[in-house]
Amino acid sequence: MTDDLKFPGAGRADSESLGQPLTGLVRDAYLPALPAESDAYWAGLEQRIMARVRAEGAEAGWWSVLAPWAQAGLVAATAIFALTSFINQRLSESESQYAYESVVQTPPPDADASESLFLASDKTAGRDATVEYVLSH
Amino acid sequence: MRIPDEERALAEKARAGDHIAFAGLVRLHQRRAYLVARAIVTVHEDAEDAVQDGFVRAYQALERFDTTQAFGAWLNRIVANAALDIARRRKVRTTEELSDALMSPFRDPAEDSELRARLAAALAQLPERARSVIVLHDVEGFTHVEIGEMLGIPGGTARSDLHHARQKLRGLLKDMRG
């Protein structure tokens, strides 16, 4: 059974109606671009619809219940979240790197101090030796 | 509104994943779905795309369909939405393209081709929504409320659009005759 393109309220008469001949012509203009009674056309369309239903019908995820604008919003939000996570990760990595480099490459303050003390004590010893030498001669 | 037993049984089976039952629903409703889509997008190929998109969306949403309601009315709203999406996505059609789309080469050449050409040209000059409202109401017999639900506008707006669309169409045809 198929619907027959004649509907209960179609072409209803009201005071402003376009009139039967004109309504008939408009209806005719909107029929498929094939003979309207062509069963082969409708069978072909049914096959194409069912092929898509089989291919895509099961692919529906929970997001398919959302309106198109909501789906777009969801995609945008996901993209922003991913970008923010990436930036945070990069910032965190560079902070760690900076901290690591500052530990590894900067000489420990104690080492500097002991070296300068050592140098200082060397200089003092040299000066003392010079003084002793001058006094003894 | 009483739902035919056959349609309800098909809808229930289809909801349980039965493809053959869904094909039965396609067979029952594809012609009217095509006319709803065509009323909105005008061009045959766009209407076919909208019908296919609409049936796929309906299949994916079957879990939410109340089988005590008319499947056709629910489907028509989905198909109309699919048609509106296509109308928004595709480029704006020129009046020549629309006029050609309404002058099918498959029609009976014995018909008054001059009158058909004039009507096609007049329809092509109408704004998209005005054209849809005329076809959905005067040709397909939908009520203002049903048209409003399909096009996402209040029923009162659909009624007022119809009034202005008819006036405009009459005016265009008169100008062409004159």
Image: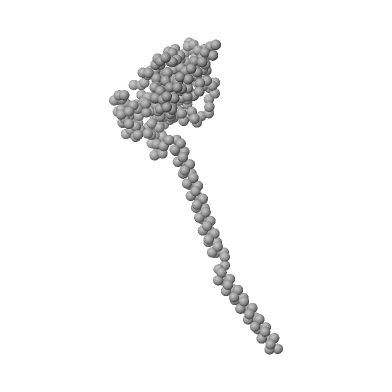
Q: Nearer the viewer, residue A78 or B178?
A: B178
- Of the 4 image quadrants, the one containing the C terminus of chain A is bottom right
Q: Is residue B78 above or below residue B124?
A: below
Name the side, left or right, on which B13 lies relative to A130.
left
Place of residue B174 in the rendered image (x, y in percent of width and height, measured from the top left) = 52, 13
Rendered residue at 54%/21% (across/down): B95
Residue found at the very far bottom of the displayed protein? A136
- Of the 4 image quadrants, the one containing the N terminus of chain A is top left
Q: Nearer the viewer, residue B43 or A17?
A: A17
Residue found at the very far right of the displayed protein? A137
Q: Quarter-wise, where is residue B64 in the image?
A: top left
Place of residue B18 in the rendered image (x, y in percent of width and height, measured from the top left) = 33, 32
Residue found at the very far left of the displayed protein? B5
Rendered residue at 36%/18% (across/down): A8
Picture mark count: 0
Q: Quarter-wise, where is residue A15 in the image?
A: top left
Place of residue A126 in the rendered image (x, y in percent of width and height, measured from the top left) = 65, 81
Q: Is residue B9 above or below residue A94?
A: above
Q: Quarter-wise, where is residue B70 in the image?
A: top left
Place of residue A128 in the rendered image (x, y in percent of width and height, measured from the top left) = 65, 83
Rendered residue at 48%/49% (across/down): A85
